[in-house]
Amino acid sequence: MTVTRLRHLAAACLSAAACALLVPPALAQTVAATATHIVPPPPQPFVLPAYTREVLPNGLTLLLLEKHEVPLVSATLVLRSGTVADPAGKEGVATLTASLLRKGTAAHTAESFSDDLDFIGMQFRASADLDATSVSVDFLKKDQAAALALLTDAVLHPTFPQTEVAKSLGQLEDGVRATKDQPQQALALYLRAFLYRTANGSPASPYGRPPSGDETSLRSLTRDDVTRFYALNYTPANAILAISGDFDATGMRSAVERSFGAWQGKAPALPPILPTRPVTGRRLLLVDKPDATQTYFALGNIGIDATDPSRGPVDVVNTLFGGRFTSLFNTELRIKSGYSYGAFSRFSELRAPGPFTMTTFTKNATTGPAIDRSLEVLNTAHTAGFTEAQLTSAKNSIAGDLPPSLETSQQLANTIARNELYGITRDQFNANLVALQRTTVPEARQILAATFPSADNLVFVIVGKASEIQPLLTKYTANITVRKISDPGY
Amino acid sequence: MTSLRRLTWRSLVLATTAAMALCDRPAAAAPIAVSTHTLPNGMTLLVQEDPSIPNIAFYTFYKIGSRNEHEGITGLSHFFEHMMFNGAVKYGKGEFDSSLDNAGGNNNAYTTRDDTVYQDWTPASALELVFDLEADRIQNLAFIPDVVNSERQVVYSERRLSVDNSNPGRLNEALDAAAFESSPYHWPVVGWPTDIESWTIDDLKTYHAMAYSPTNATVVVVGNVHAADVFRLADQYFAPIPAHAPPPPVRTREMPQMGERRVVVRKFAQLPLLMIGYHAVAAKDPDLYPLLVVDSLLTTGESSRLYHALVDAQLALEVGSDIRPSMDPSLFTIEAQPRAGVQPEAVEQAIYTEIDKLRATPVSERELTKAKNQIIAQQFRQLQTIAGRAQEIGAAQVFFGDWQHVNQEEQLVNAVTAADVQRVVQKYFARTNRTVATLIPDTTPTAADAKEVQ
């Protein structure tokens, strides 16, 4: 049993780091000037390594990045159709389809597929998130032929046996129950559902729908839904294949052509991006979890999309606001007050504007003070902005964290695939790293005003023990919705 | 799911005769080369040079964990770990974190039953800063009363997150408390709630003096550095730390178990949970390797025996198992989340059926090879990063007494035979040697209204 300080509590669900000492600017400068403290030079610039990009005759986009330190190879196949492509009322079908790829193929039963992939110690993951479906494998160099054969078989030739469909559906249904036993995980789903809902409760954007379905939608899914989703979305023109690791690019290109060359099909129309504007005013969702001794809450609004031109400077500012351990938010909620083990903020990176969220948790008795303090943090950032020294520190954090985030073949394959998904070239990615280093104090202030919500325009989502905390929530807004965690859906 | 952070045991690949003899075996990675240096005060330094990224991983391992505690101060090792970030003399409160942040670095720490590990990840240019920061807090930690009380609340919040409001966390605590009667593994690393409320500054000071001696520390640096530079800085910053006695040995050992133990936790939940623990071995026991193979056979991948018998058979949503190196003998655990409507007892029976098969029939050569390949491929992945290597080199030194163990593990895994597997299943997976913990969903008002202690 291990207990950690969990500085990266955010890592699973929150993005880049950031943070400001909550010391006043004058003190910050004094600290920097203390002669006895060692102040190293800024991190050396680091860039995303070069890779080749090519669109094969069948429309498949192929990205190859050679990397030879370790005899491992990672391949990620991304389809530009995620859970957003679930037909209305059929939420969960993208996830179900991905989970079934290995459960019976032209060449394998579910059992023999697993046996072959486990025999070579290979990893296989298939899942759908909002914007994309990904199938990734990680294998030893010497097993390249066997690994590519398994990947191809799963993606091109799944048979979706009815018995496996029924099993996976059952697992997804119980997965909803398991999620609701984990308040932190459930919070993110409740937040998105509530944020992307219009004032009258109807969904304003597919981002508000549950990516793995819910108690109601899963009951309606059938094998036909799966085969229809597969036929429409699993096509080469809709796919990106990113491979990184210990291989020779020429040989790998031929191997891919042999494996994927015969695959045919047009890309489906991308799901329309509905115009989503930030919420004005406040609304609050309370999810009653009657056994909770700790309240988990998120404050948020709609933020920016993945390719927003201000993305780099926003990362710098969010690093200081709530992206790293020493951020304004964590300093107030953890370091100064001890209310929480951790408090983090992030801007999601999605095709359409994704949520901006501030999340933390605290014992029932300090729920009110912790929410108050979170709102103060937002107000303080808007009024005080950040100093030059703080911006420098955030830029160094981002630059210093970059090399270990592009260290493994898996990280590189995922990064270049994701860039391709959002239409970001290597040059743009690297130029953005340079540009964010130029963020100025006035620019940061402008970003706070334009991109961070004001405390008056916020969605509150709170998972906790209603009988203890509900009375104190009315002071934030009269616009309160209450539901039980055991109620179907999110 | 038994731990907040899985630090499963894995390591390096060394091409040996045994390794080559096995079909489908990689023989690729060169052995890890480590330079070593010991200071006059007893501190050990281990360096692996790797210029592939311009960063370093700087890990400090102290052989101190919750097993070194006693009732009344449970959780103090972990609390102390938190206090190590709350100010010393040269770098005051908040300045450890802010100095590293300003330099583009990052840090964390974790505490286990056996050790406490401080992790700094920084650009290589911050190497000297890391030495300065670490030397300052090892020697001159400040104990500020307000800070102690605020941090106490943070730790309590961590306990609520990882135990009180976590079904697996709560059940795991109950399992350990029942399985270990006399061993210090009886209490949780985070500490009992009433102890968290009661630690004093004097407890902290006593603990610091007892545990944080240079002889008790191993520093591992991996990344874009020269070993000579690291050793020069160690002579400058760490050599002046006065030597003193290491912590006293832990005397209390677990008694042999004399019959199955069962424990039930009733808690608000949507689904039940099941955990089974068998008393197994400490790191240095050679039976560790066959047990690692058993772990892989039972639950690694969808071809594993328990995935097949539980998940595929629709009895459980997921299943996992765990055995990891420890100072004293620890548990081999199996955990499963039963599907809705499935009684935990049915899942339990299915697990025993699979264990009985392993006990009765030797595993086939192909299945044995599969299990070894899975372990070794996982070792490769762990050792891809400078952080992964710093962890493994340090763990080898702390748990096996020699960093070279990272270069021996593949051979040790490959040497396991089908007969070894059968023997350890017969030896450790006995009914009388097990503890079974079950979480039963409870929606009655009593369960929902259960108040926390604080």
Image: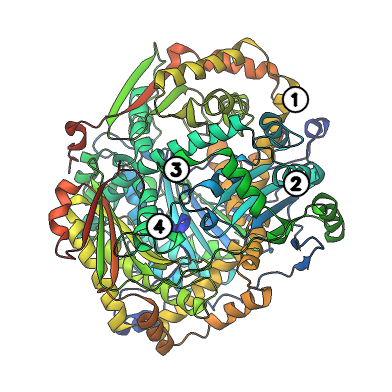
Mark 4 lies on residue: B138
Circle 4: residue type? Ile
Q: Nearer the viewer, residue B324 or B158?
A: B158
Label 3 Cα crowd, 10 Å radius (few <14 / some 14-19 / many 20+):
many
The relative height of residue A307 versus residue A271 in the rendered view (above or below) is: below
Q: Nearer the viewer, mark 2 or mark 3?
A: 2
Q: Nearer the viewer, residue A95 or A25?
A: A95
Mark 3 lies on residue: B115
Separation of marks 1 and 3 at Cα, in angstroms: 37 Å
Q: Nearer the viewer, residue B265 or A341?
A: B265
Q: Give SS at disc 2.
A: helix
Q: Nearer the viewer, mark 1 or mark 3?
A: 1
Q: Nearer the viewer, mark 1 or mark 2?
A: 2
Is residue B422 something one can see in this rendering? yes
Q: Give SS at disc 4.
A: helix
- The total of numbered circles placed on residues is 4
Q: Position of residue B284 (x, y in %)?
A: 56, 30
| Quadrant in the picture for the C terminus of chain B | top left
| Quadrant in the picture for the N terminus of chain B | top left
Q: Position of residue A470 (x, y in %)?
A: 16, 53
Q: Nearer the viewer, mark 4 or mark 3?
A: 3
- Please, which chain is the residue tagged with disc 1 on? B
Mark 2 lies on residue: A152
Circle 1: residue type? Arg
Is residue B68 something one can see in this rendering? no
* Same chain for the residues under marks 4 and 2 in the image: no
Looking at marks 4 and 1 on the same chain, the residue that comes earlier in the sequence is marked by: 4
Q: Give SS at disc 3.
A: loop
Q: Which of the numbered marks, if any, corresponds to residue B366?
A: 1
Q: Nearer the viewer, mark 4 or mark 1?
A: 1
Circle 2: residue type? Thr
